[in-house]
Amino acid sequence: YELFFQAQNRAYRPFDQTPITIIIWVAAITYVIAKYEFLTISPALTSNRLVDKIHEFVILLNTKLETTYFNKRAKDIFFSSNKEPDFKAITISNLIEENQIIEKEIALLKSETHNSFAGRVHLVQQSNNNICADIVCKIIRDNFSDIVGIFIIGNTIINNNEQGEVNIT
């Protein structure tokens, strides 16, 4: 009988600090979910990730024609350094040679006479390469039809010597 009783006392018992261990594991999992954005779906995060995956360059402008966003492809085209550009200092005239034509067309878009316009323009770059691009500009409006910004998407055409032209659609 005594031998049996000693064997029962030496039986496996759970660790006495199990609640603390569970708290540490839950805290670690919560930290990883928060830091690496697991299990989160936010419209801003999702839209930025989608736009960064587009192979064409994408530029978002505010109503003053100042840039607010470049996707990865646009940063590769317009900026040689990996440094994040100062968006408020960059306007449409810093990006496109035919900026006066584009500004007039954007003014037409703002007056609600057209939905979008497309054209071939020359891009202004730091490396002075002659790069043409076919672009499409579209006005972004909110639920009250107020203008929120301008969406420009384009595809580059390397070493094209044709003059820029704009077609309204």
Image (cartoon, rainbow, N blue to C red):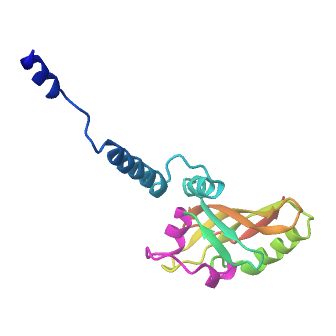
Question: Where is residue 81, by image quadrant?
Answer: bottom left
Query: Which of the two residues, 62 or 54, is positioned nearer the viewer here?
Result: 62
Q: Residue at coordinates 63% horizontally, 63% vertically from top-left? A: 58
Q: Residue at coordinates 43% horizontally, 73% vertically from top-left? A: 82
Can you say which quadrant of the picture contains the N terminus? Answer: top left
Is 66 a magenta residue? no
Q: Residue furthest front?
A: 1
Can you say which quadrant of the picture contains the C terminus? Answer: bottom right
For residue 141, side relative to residue 31 (left or right)? right
Relative image position of residue 135 (x, y in whole percent): 69, 63
Query: Which of the two residues, 73 or 148, is positioned nearer the viewer here?
Result: 148
The magenta stretch is 72-94
Relative image position of residue 8 (x, y in whole percent): 16, 23
Question: Where is residue 16, by image quadrant?
Answer: top left
Q: How many marks?
A: 0
For residue 118, side relative to residue 128 (left or right)? right
Q: Residue furthest bottom?
A: 89
For residue 137, side relative to residue 158 (left or right)? right
Relative image position of residue 112 (x, y in whole percent): 91, 65
Query: Which of the two residues, 92 or 118, is positioned nearer the viewer here?
Result: 92
Is residue 73 placed above or below 93 in the rendered structure?
Answer: above
Query: Which of the two residues, 155 or 19, is positioned nearer the viewer here?
Result: 19
Q: Residue furthest top?
A: 1
Q: Residue furthest left?
A: 3
Relative image position of residue 134 (x, y in whole percent): 67, 62
